Image (spheres, rainbow, N blue to C red):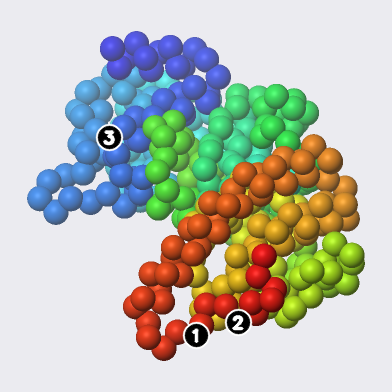
Amino acid sequence: MLDQTIRRCMAKHPLRLLSFASYVIGVVTPDRRWHETRLASESPPLTNLVTGLVGRRCPETTVMLAALAELLVDDDDLQCRCREEVATRSDRLPKWLAAPSSLQAYRAVRQRHVLSDGDEWAIGGRLGDGSEFTIATYLDHNLLSAATRIVVHKHPIDEVVADPGLHIETVANPVDESLADARAWIARGLTMSEVLPQDESWRHCRPLITWLMAHLPEGGSIGAPGRYDLPEAAGLIDGFLTSPAGAPFRDAAYRDLLAELCDTGSGDAARWSVTRISTALRDPRYDPHVPLEVALDAPALLRAFVPFAHAHSDVGQAFTDDAVATINRMGLTYKQLLLDDAARELEDDDDSPPWFTYPDQAS
């Protein structure tokens, strides 16, 4: 059965064999940190797999060992063992596998969600026989920019970027980025994703993206995920608080609360998605340094600020309507959860200040 599968993969695009090898690695090492798996009392399952392939000499296992040698970039010992075994055999390898590390990663494209919820990074690769492919990774800025999706395309990156059906649903125009920056962003995203539950397809693609990352240059930098830096965000907040829409919220405590809300999700003060708002309002925590009546006004503050911010960032009215509807739907529950949390905190702290310090401002 394994021999038949390998032969079928060899008859297709090289990515088919690499994807199968990546799948096998993911299956035998269920821990997402597959390259770190080490058992004290027995050989790791990936080592056992390589041992089995080494012990069965035939063209199919030779090809599989060569493919594993490509992907095992984080396990020098196993990678070396696979390559040494392949070198002892006379079986013919596909052209793209005959020269180790023939991969050339030649282009990185970043496509941003229009509401800054996340970025999709697409990396174009070319193998020794001229075959091209693209691996796209989605970084979710509402989840600390963790990598939450990996998609493998057997098409050149130019075709992938040009086809809107192959991307996240709402993206801005693609922007070419440096390969080093792509590596820095994706590496951070993979690290952040370790604590998240992932489906099987994501885990099976992990060895592929790790292999591709090893062929990208180091030294890249990571900027803020959102479009606004701190001074620009402060300017937007100032503009709001001096506008008619911000008139009810000119107390300094509201400025602090709005700054905290702008620090959620992507950190982009000018763009607010349903997902970001839902995350911000779903699990409130009582902060004794913020007057409770001010914290309770978070939904009202967002209800006024989001349309103002979207009007200054060319966000469509439909997105604004969805955002305001989400605030209206979650506002009452947010207040009840915040009051419940405050009650628990104050019961445990005799030195806490009175709940309401600005009773005339409570809404």
Mark seen at residue 28: 3
Mark seen at residue 357: 2
The answer to whether the residue labelled 3 contacts the one labelled 2, judged by CB atoms less than 8 Å apart, is no
Mark seen at residue 353: 1
**With 246 as the anchor, is 98 left or right in this view?**
left
Query: At numbered mark 2, what does the secondary structure look like: helix, strand or loop?
Result: loop
Residue 125 appears in the figure: no
Question: Disc 3 to disc 2, how far (Cα)?
Answer: 59 Å
Q: Is residue 150 above or below residue 253?
A: above
Q: Residue at x 74, y 25 (%)?
A: 163
Q: In this orientation, which residue lies closer to the viewer: 176 or 325? A: 325
The answer to whether the residue labelled 2 contacts the one labelled 1, judged by CB atoms less than 8 Å apart, is yes
| Residue type pointed to by label 1 | Pro
**With 81 as the anchor, is 119 left or right in this view?**
right
**With 294 as the anchor, is 67 left or right in this view?**
left
| Residue type pointed to by label 3 | Val
| Residue type pointed to by label 2 | Thr
Question: Disc 2 to disc 1, how far (Cα)?
Answer: 8 Å
Mark 3 or mark 2: name the one nearer the start of the chain. Answer: 3
Tell which tag, 3 or 2, sits nearer the viewer. Answer: 2
Could you say which quadrant of the image residue 64 lies in?
Answer: top left
Q: Residue at x 31, y 44 (%)?
A: 31
